[in-house]
Amino acid sequence: MFPLKDENPTSRFAWMTWLILAVNVAVFGWEVWLSVSAGSGALSSFLGAWAFDPAALAAAPFDPRVWLTILTSMFLHAGWIHIGGNMLYLAIFANNVEDRLGPWWFLAFYLSCGIAAALAQAMGSGFADTAMLGASGAIAGTLAAYLMLFPRAKVLTAIWVFIFIELARIPAWVLIVVWFLLQLASGVGTIGPAASSDGVAYLAHVGGFVAGLALIVPAWLADHRRGNFVAWR
């Protein structure tokens, strides 16, 4: 299943979502420029400097620069498919979460989910010496918030049936729960420093999602205390 757009209008322009998206695209543009103009070595040096290395955290847990790379790694991507998929999910699901939380609380929520995702992947990998990068952990937390706040919102989704593609409007909770179960099943097989992996930080997705569920609870409870069931359409 591949989401295309949701049918869940916002009450205001989600400028923080679009700013986060623009920063991701701009940084990826810089990566492409480095690769084309200076070669793969320059790109590798850039990613090595600003991606998150779990082994570095284990070696220097109180080094502020290591913690800074957890934040900077959320705005790095490994290729066109990586950034394309992440930005599509961000554009579809983040604007409604921002609309509910407000731009600054949404930014705090987004970054907190990304930090939790990075730490989950680091611990699950046994603090392996590898470069972690990408916005998917933070976006996973955003999906969890969307699941809690707007479970019945319809999402236009492309579904592959053998060689055909069908378009269907499905509830957000179906799409997001299926996505999470796939991440969880894949992540279990990557636990431990010697586990095999296809390069995807599945445990970061799981960690970000769980963090998103926990962090969105106050907003979810507030909606229900006010009798605001509009979000559950």
Image (cartoon, grey):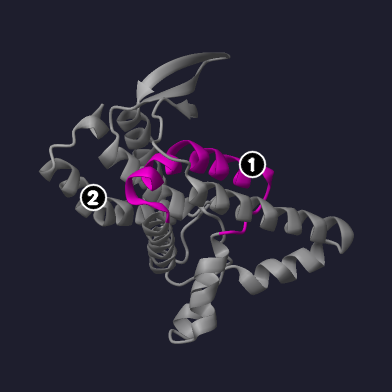
Observer-nearest residue: 49 or 162? 49
Q: Position of residue 53 (x, y in %)?
A: 54, 72
Q: Residue at x 50, y 55 (%)?
A: 196
| Res 199 seen here | no
- Horizontally, residue 12 falls left or right of residue 20, namely left
| Labels 1, 2: front one | 2
Location of residue 227 by image quarter: top left
- Horizontally, residue 123 falls left or right of residue 65, namely left
Q: Position of residue 7 (x, y in %)?
A: 41, 25
Q: Residue at x 30, y 39 (%)?
A: 147
Q: Which residue is mark 1?
A: 81
Range shown magenta = 75-103
- Horizontally, residue 125 falls left or right of residue 24, namely left
- The disc at residue 14 is none
| Res 42 seen here | yes
> Which residue is the extreme one toward the front?
12
Location of residue 42 by image quarter: bottom right
Q: Residue at x 61, y 46 (%)?
A: 82
Q: Which residue is mark 2?
A: 219
**Where 68 falls versus 208 (above or below)?**
below
> Which residue is the extreme one toward the right?
37
